[in-house]
Amino acid sequence: MTKLIEIISANKKFKTPEGENVIALDDVTLDVKEKEFITLLGPSGCGKTTLLRSISGFEELDSGDILIDSQKMTDVPPYKRPVNTVFQNYALFPHLNIEKNIGYGLDVTKCERKERNKRVNETLDLVGLSGYENRKPSQLSGGQQQRVALARAIINRPKILLLDEPLSALDRKLRQSMQLELKNIQNELGIAFIFVTHDQEEALTMSDKIIVMNQGKIIQTGTPTQIYDNPSSKFTAQFIGESNFFEGKIININEKLTIKSNCSNIIYLKNFDQSKFIIDKNVIILLRPEELSLNPYDSNDECFIEGTVKQIFFLGTDYKILLEIANKKIIHCSLRDSSRNEIQKFKIGVKIKLFYNPMSIRVLNNE
């Protein structure tokens, strides 16, 4: 697939009111291919919006290059770049009706009237707003306003659509609905989307590729399954999904990796590269809550963690159990509703064993 955007060693600093320099982008290098749905994911202040604004031309890099279609964007103003942006606050014109809001970009370019009306009607239909063209933005719901902003951004047929947390103001159910709609629209349009969010569920649901950022740096790049199943660092593991971490020391390396954790548990790992581990090495162990079970895996009853039930929460399709193990450490376990009969026998304060599959353990460097 052809590279549509190339970001090469992008650096950007901002001055605080106190005169200090804050690094927003730290040697960021990234490629975006045609028709990809890329999500920039990270906590507030990690640099994702600065990167988006640099691509659109609203921020100027201190150093580095941005190329779109192999053309350097240095000194190219935002209105001449083949990108459009959907902002967090939608930025609709309150005095114009929906038809005029959507057609505004075509009016500015003096598009021929017949072609302009045809494209407005096609775009209204694409975002599910046919019949709403005479309403004002204030007469629409939040989800409908979001669709208007999206329609206005895509009507000029940009090669890249940039979306800066456009769903953050919507309630949970509407957000989930709009996530699927955005992905469907992206597939239908066949253009690249770069989506900024700090919501891991949005990133996992919508993306072809996730870029995890922190403190102006790219921490990890991969597909949603790669990022979730094989996080390269504790930061990524914490940010994507729930995680249980154990610090420990390797005490044996044979067909199983044996780790003595600081919570007195012995934890076993199978299917590992022996060349990467040495005796007495300090490591961080990652165990996802959903990988814990009430029943042993493969009749292997040594792979378990024992503790005292502190809380039980019913979440509809899952139960969440908080278990206190040695050193007063609390770990989380997610069990499917299919285990309801067993779970309902539990009482706060009872001791139970939670089993894990030694193939599902991940070991991170103790950095």
Image: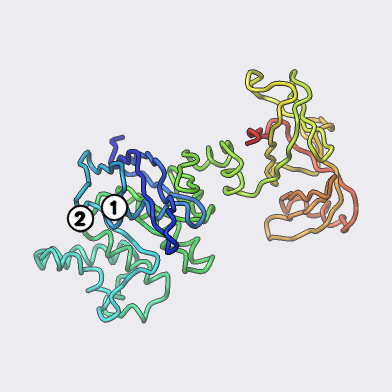
Location of mark 1 (residue): 60
> How crowded is the residue under tag 2: few (<14 C-alpha within 10 Å), some, or many (20+)?
few
Residue 11 percent coordinates (x, y) = 36, 45
Query: The residue tagged with tag 2: helix, strand or loop?
Result: loop
Which residue is more in the foreground, 151 or 273?
273
Which residue is more in the foreground, 122 or 241?
241
* Residue kind at label 1, given as amino acid type: Glu
Name the residue: 57% across, 42% down: 228
> How crowded is the residue under tag 1: few (<14 C-alpha within 10 Å), some, or many (20+)?
some
Residue 356: name its quadrant: top right
Query: The residue tagged with tag 1: helix, strand or loop?
Result: loop
Residue 348 percent coordinates (x, y) = 87, 58
The residue sitting at the front extreme is: 19
Residue 310 is tagged as none
Residue 77 is tagged as 2
The residue sitting at the right extreme is: 350
Residue 86 percent coordinates (x, y) = 34, 61
Quarter of the image with the N terminus in it: top left
Label 2, label 1: how far apart the Cα atoms are: 10 Å
Name the residue: 33% across, 55% down: 53
Quarter of the image with the C terminus in it: top right
Direction from residue 156 to residue 49 in the image, left or right: right
Residue 130: name its quadrant: bottom left
Residue 115 percent coordinates (x, y) = 13, 63
Marks 2 and 1, the one that precedes in the sequence? 1
